[in-house]
Image (cartoon, rainbow, N blue to C red):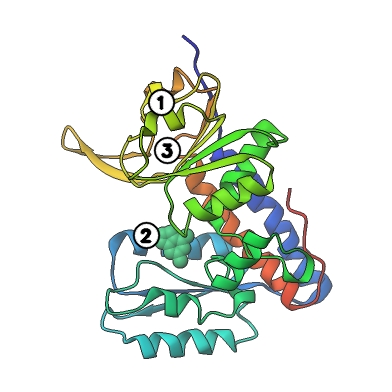
Amino acid sequence: MSTATIIDGRKFSATLRGRIAEEVTRLKNDHDLTPGLAVVLVGEDPASQVYVRSKGKQTLEAGMNSYEHKMPAETTQEELLAKVEELNNDPAVHGILVQLPVPDHIDDHAIINAIDPNKDVDGFHVINSGRLATGARGASAPMIPCTPLGSIMLLKDHLGDLSSKTAVVVGRSNIVGKPMAQLLLQESCTVTIAHSRTKDLPDVVRQADIVVAAVGRPEMVKGDWVKPGATVIDVGINRIEVDGKNKLVGDVATAEAMEHAGAITPVPGGVGPMTIACLLANTLTAASRQNGLEEPNLL
Ligand code: GUN
């Protein structure tokens, strides 16, 4: 029985955050510029509150300015659009993130697409997804969604060149599945996007040198779905109850998958910590671009 290498996202993200903090210090000293990230939270969803608090804390730790805007659950779409417009026009704010999900009476597409694409540190605006899909570079390079960006960094760090590898992304969300597939394609992988309607899903996953699980279903990807030696990126963060206790598990049955995979990201401690680190990286990139400065190379 072989046992997979654990891909340590905590360690990698700590190094990345250290590099970001160094660059922030340099921007302050050389250009009198402090990157600023505004996070808007509408309503009181407990999981969103935890994420937003964590984002604010890590933003300050990186030496950036953090602006938190908490709005009541009854906030209208017009009021939220007005907040986005105010942040678009604020020169101290380089990155804007509206925490999702927003309450049902608000159209999330309308909100996302009202954000200035150059401040869209989530990379969810249609302009950024279009730029990613078309491989735009230079002045029109996209902001890349944070979880896929963190996942591709871990993959490249572990595997080096990804070209010619077969990749299966399980999940087709705008936040992870679709942009992840674009990034893998850009690395010259042969990419399949699988989802809840995919026929013979275990067999499809078994073809993959790289498996990215992003479905939001606890331990759905079983060990014997994983080709021997494959690299498994588990994006899931699911809270389940085991023997009356809360437990965090991914979308992959990790213990089983360890017996087949060459390497795997754990939950917690894999992709999760990379997401906020990449949000900070995107904020730094956005601040640099908005001020006509060269983008820092963080890796
Ligand atoms: N909710 C869950 N993940 C995310 C994310 O990456 N960005 C935003 N804005 N909301 C989220």
Q: Position of residue 137 (x, y in %)?
A: 76, 63
Q: Earlier in the sequence, mark 1 or mark 3?
A: 1
Q: Which residue is mark 2?
A: 50
- Mark 1 and 3 residues: CB-CB less than 8 Å, in contact? no
Can residue 62 be seen by looking at this rendering?
A: no
In three-dimensional space, the C-alpha distance between marks 2 and 3, rounded to whole angstroms, equals 17 Å
Q: Amino acid at mark 1?
A: Trp
Q: Position of residue 103 (x, y in %)?
A: 29, 74
Q: Secondary structure at mark 2?
A: helix
Q: Secondary structure at mark 3?
A: loop
At x 37%, y 39%, the residue is 251
Q: Which residue is mark 3?
A: 267
Q: Earlier in the sequence, mark 2 or mark 1?
A: 2
Q: Amino acid at mark 3?
A: Val
Q: Nearer the viewer, mark 2 or mark 3?
A: 3
Q: Secondary structure at mark 1?
A: helix
Q: Nearer the viewer, residue 229 or 32?
A: 229
> Hey, which residue is sitting farthest left in the picture?
244
Q: Nearer the viewer, mark 1 or mark 3?
A: 1
At x 39%, y 21%, the residue is 224
Can residue 89 be seen by looking at this rendering?
A: yes
Against 145, residue 293 (above or below) is below
Q: Nearer the viewer, mark 2 or mark 1?
A: 1
Disc on res. 225: 1
Q: Nearer the viewer, residue 217 or 17?
A: 217
Disc on res. 137: none
Against 237, residue 283 (above or below) is below
Local packing at callout 2 (Cα closer than 10 Å; few below 14, some 14-19, many 20+) is: few
Q: Earlier in the sequence, mark 2 or mark 3?
A: 2
Q: Is residue 50 left or right of residue 244?
A: right
